[in-house]
Amino acid sequence: MGTEHNDISVGDSVVVKEGVMCPDYEGLSIAGWQGRVAELDEVVNEDEEALEAGSVCIEWDSITLRALPEEYVRQSEVDGLEWGKMWLHADEVELLQLRDRDQDARAMYKEIASRHSHSHLGEEGSRIQEVLAGVDPDDDLGCMQAWCEHLETVVSFPFDAGISEFQERGPLRDGDHVRVLAILDVDDLYGVIVDVKSGRKKCAFPLCDLEVVDKESPNYQPVKDYCIWSANR
């Protein structure tokens, strides 16, 4: 038996033919999208007694990645789908000359992934991305400082909050209510630290373990967005 693959091999550059639509999102044309074949799903051609590509996994090149609709990337993140590559039937693509380098595609993928690192969180994720725009998502301290600056701008102090997370030690317990007085600092482990008061007791406490009591307050959503980011970092 031979090992022909319908002239398509791993590493080849292919382009999506006219009329081909995205298999995941109705109404989205992917004609003209181009990339490299990363994997082949081979089938046996009984007439020619040879292996051929039944479907191909295409990793999009840097030019296609740059042109991806932002909403497509965002929705893919929300739905848990991969936007940087796609499986298509071999008949839906054709060979075409390479137009970039592997490292160009990797760099573009990283850039887009950085912009959408929280898109899987939906509306909260979009707001989080706005707060952290331009900050390296791997720079925890830089992200915390960005949150500190944002919260100092949009949150009015003081406000009432409840302890929303289990406390293994310390003077406060889950369910306690406190008065949040101000932001004190950022910590590389606990994030934004706030000054809180409970009765006669005052202490420093991580904001990520608090929830604004008044859900109608303008403070509620910014603090919740921060807590969501903290829980997913």
Image (cartoon, helix red, strand yellow):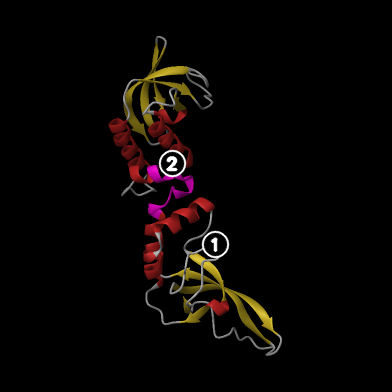
User: Would you say residue 162 sits in the magenta stretch?
Assistant: no
Name which residue type carries label 2: Glu
Residue type marked 1: Asp
- Give the number of the mark in front: 1 or 2: 1
Choose between 193 and 210: the one closer to the eye: 210
Comparing 189 with 32, the one in front is: 32
Q: Residue 66 at x, y = what percent?
A: 36, 65
Tell me the quarter of the picture where residue 196 sits: top left
**The C terminus: image quadrant:** top left
| Residue matched to label 1 | 24
Q: Residue at image x 45%, y 22%?
A: 213
| Image quarter (top left, top right, bottom left or bottom right) of the N terminus | bottom right
**Residue range (magenta):** 114-128
Q: How far apart are the two marked residues, 1 and 2, measured between alpha carbons?
A: 24 Å
Kindly give the residue lying farthest to the top in the view shown: 200
Q: Which mark is residue 124?
A: 2
**Main secondary structure along the magenta-highlighted residues:** helix
Residue 191 seen in the current view: no
Judging depth in this view, the residue of 102 and 56 nearest the camera is 56
Viewer can see residue 197 = yes
Q: Give the residue at x 38% y 36%.
A: 188
